[in-house]
Image: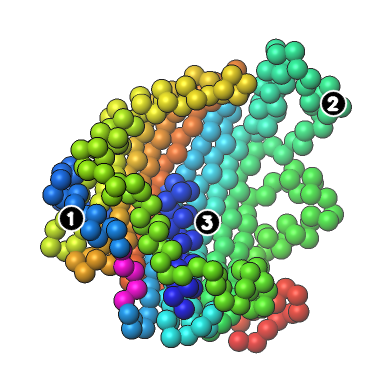
């Protein structure tokens, strides 16, 4: 069962730490503390904990994990915009004395919104063709793809909601989409009409364990992963820091516009890695220097770059959570046109919380391959 715990931890932390998801929606993205710049004493104490982080107490019957994330990102290209926003909560309670899905109770709730201006695709297409023509390269049209063949999907404003649950060894999923335009429906044709109707009306499916386990890859649900993999992820946050002194670490981080802060109080250890005011200039210079001449992106300018990453351990050295928040504004020339990128988000991970909220009944959830199933 510890292998199963590690899978859930690994997936949730990977999403939080590397997807840079997002903002608001009750997601704080911070871990409160009395942080001070890392010095020799606080750094040495922190490395003692981080070098061998603990996650699950021996003999603990229930392991809880809660993940919350929100994000929004938008791109404005030559006057036309596209944006996507997502918010998600995921709660897991795992009975360490049971094997496989029988020991898991979980609820995942997500919402995705996509908005796109009319003619956004045309605007990008025209910029690409113009840039190719200016360089004397063959354009899409030269290969037989005429501009008129680009689908006219019009303005997009779609919202999708989905929920997934695991309980008593069973897996349930439901969802609904609204805002699919008539233009998109027309492009979908007869074959796509039934799918779109199902998505708009809403669906409730109960998926067989065999199907889930086949997707996962084995009945052991990740037999190759043990509980120590979560320790590797935590260690990755301070990768390489334990092999040198704090002065070298601080100097290295300063080169890229980061600072390391530590709160080693009576309630445990908290670590914070954050950008400084110099980060946007440093990263802008670094990225522009790395851009190859044949890459259609140039003149990157970062006007805002705020990033904070947190990890926390209790007084006994057990990993209790992590958090992330990010806020980025940047512009660049893409295919010769001005593009603006905005990303804002936050995520929280809490270990030990297992407040899993399930529907009062799963009546109406059907096996999509075999009709309605019984609970």
Residue 267 found in image quarter: bottom left
Foreground of the two, 92 or 44:
44
The segment highlighted magenta reads: 53-57
Foreground of the two, 184 or 87:
87
The question of residue 49 being in magenta is answered with: no
Residues packed near mark 1 inside 10 Å, few (<14), some (14 to 19) or many (20 plus): few
Earlier along the polypeptide chain: callout 3 or callout 2?
Answer: 3
The question of residue 54 being in magenta is answered with: yes
SS for callout 2 = helix
Foreground of the two, 296 or 353:
296
Q: CA distance from mark 3 to mark 2?
A: 39 Å
In the image, what residue occupies the spot 31% across and 76% down?
Answer: 57
Residues packed near mark 2 inside 10 Å, few (<14), some (14 to 19) or many (20 plus): few
Query: Looking at the image, is mark 1 or mark 3 nearer the viewer?
Result: 1
Foreground of the two, 224 or 22:
224
Query: Looking at the image, is mark 3 or mark 2 nearer the viewer?
Result: 2
Quadrant of the image containing the C terminus: bottom right
The count of marks equals 3
Question: What label does residue 111 carry, if any?
Answer: 3
Given contact means CB atoms under 8 Å apart, are the residues at marks 1 and 2 in contact? Answer: no
Label 1, on which residue? 45
In the image, what residue occupies the spot 61% across and 34% down?
Answer: 117
């Amino acid at each position: 069962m510890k292998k199963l715990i590690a899978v859930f931890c690994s997936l949730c932390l990977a999403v939080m730490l590397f997807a840079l998801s997002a903002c608001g929606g009750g997601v704080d993205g911070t871990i409160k503390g009395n942080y001070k710049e890392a010095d020799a004493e606080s750094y040495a104490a922190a490395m003692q904990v981080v070098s061998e982080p603990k996650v699950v107490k021996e003999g603990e019957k229930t392991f809880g994990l809660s993940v919350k994330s929100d994000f929004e990102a938008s791109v404005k290209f030559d006057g036309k915009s596209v944006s996507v926003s997502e918010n998600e909560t995921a709660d897991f309670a795992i009975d360490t004395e049971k094997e496989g899905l029988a020991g898991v109770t979980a609820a995942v709730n997500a919402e995705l919104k996509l908005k796109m201006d009319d003619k956004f695709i045309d605007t990008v297409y025209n910029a690409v063709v113009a840039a190719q023509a200016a360089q004397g390269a063959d354009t899409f049209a030269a290969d037989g793809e005429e501009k008129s063949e680009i689908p006219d999907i019009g303005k997009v404003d779609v919202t999708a909601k989905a929920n997934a649950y695991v309980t008593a060894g069973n897996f349930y999923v439901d969802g609904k989409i609204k805002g699919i335009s008539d233009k998109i429906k027309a492009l979908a044709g007869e074959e796509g009409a039934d799918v779109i109707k199902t998505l708009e009306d809403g669906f409730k499916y109960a998926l067989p364990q065999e199907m889930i386990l086949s997707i996962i890859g084995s009945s052991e649900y990740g037999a190759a992963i043990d509980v120590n993999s979560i320790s590797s992820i935590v260690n990755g946050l301070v990768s390489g820091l334990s092999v040198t002194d704090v002065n070298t670490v601080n100097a290295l981080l300063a080169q890229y516009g980061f600072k390391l802060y530590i709160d080693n109080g009576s309630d445990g250890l908290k670590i914070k890695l954050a950008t400084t005011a110099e980060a946007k200039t440093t990263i802008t210079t670094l990225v522009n220097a790395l851009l190859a001449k044949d890459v259609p992106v140039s003149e990157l300018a970062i006007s805002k770059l705020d990033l904070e990453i947190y990890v926390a351990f209790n007084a006994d050295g057990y990993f209790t959570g992590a958090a992330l928040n990010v806020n980025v504004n940047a512009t660049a020339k893409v295919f010769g046109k001005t593009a603006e990128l905005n990303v804002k988000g936050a995520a929280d991970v809490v270990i030990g919380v297992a407040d899993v909220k399930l529907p009062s009944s799963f009546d109406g959830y059907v096996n999509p391959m075999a009709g309605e199933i019984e609970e």
